[in-house]
Amino acid sequence: MNDAKPQPALFSFSPDNLARAEKIVGKYPAGRQASAVIPLLDIAQRQSGNWLPQAAMDYVAAMLEMPPIRVYEVASFYTMFNLKPVGENFVQVCTTTPCWLRGSDEIVHACKRKLGIGMNQTTEDSKFTLHEVECMGACVNAPMVQINDDYYEDLTPELMDSILDALKEGKKPDVGSQTGRKGSCAQNGSTSLKEKA
């Protein structure tokens, strides 16, 4: 996919998103509307197909009466915002130490092999973008990936292949632990508090 997708000239919230945005802005005291910048950028990114064109950032800046540069600073600081188009399935592989110790390198290789792309690349059909990220807070169930808003944990290369295959077929794989682990329970099951008082 060509990452140089043209920037749209104009952006405005859909009626539903405008109502959501106005409700969020209304939570802040007068003169403090700029505090709503992150949730409004999230709404704009979702409406734009999981990326933030400049026109969307400018629209949010105008709505919040902020200088556009302040909005650009926020959008470029937080990795949750995509400043260029990404695929329909945004695959973010955690490679921080806990995930790495549990095999995230193998998950990265499985994704590259299955999708035929490298890090920070998008498949030709725009279905998948692969990205490396730092800790996403699911260390106990490492290795893990985030695909769009969902976490997939306790992965093996084979399980990762199955998830990607399901997404290619338009299916939604079960989220969470791929081994059936409940929450952050030990891999071999509960080891304490087994009996009720």
Image (spheres, rainbow, N blue to C red):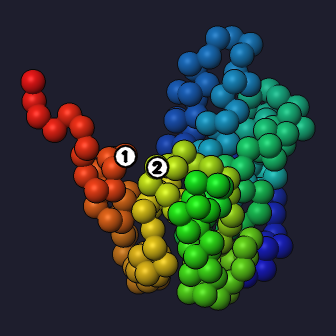
Tell me residue 120's x, y (percent): 74, 71
Does residue 60 appear to the left or right of 23 in the view shown? right
- Point out which mark residue 140 bears: 2
In this view, the residue farthest toward the top is 30
Say what amino acid the circle numbered 1 marks.
Ser
Identify which residue is drawn at 82% across, 28% down.
66
Does residue 80 appear to the left or right of 144 in the view shown? right
State which quadrant residue 109 falls in: bottom right
Tell me residue 73's x, y (percent): 85, 39
Quadrant for the C terminus, please: top left
Task: Report how far apart the C-alphas of labels 2 and 1 lie in the structure.
Answer: 6 Å
CB of mark 2 within 8 Å of CB of mark 1? yes
Mark 1 is surrounded, within 10 Å at the Cα level, by few (under 14), some (14 to 19) or many (20 or more) other residues, namely few
| Residue 10 visible, this angle | no
Regarding mark 1 in the picture, which secondary structure is present there? Answer: loop
Identify which residue is drawn at 77% across, 57% down.
83
Quadrant for the N terminus, please: bottom right
Q: Which residue is mark 1?
A: 184
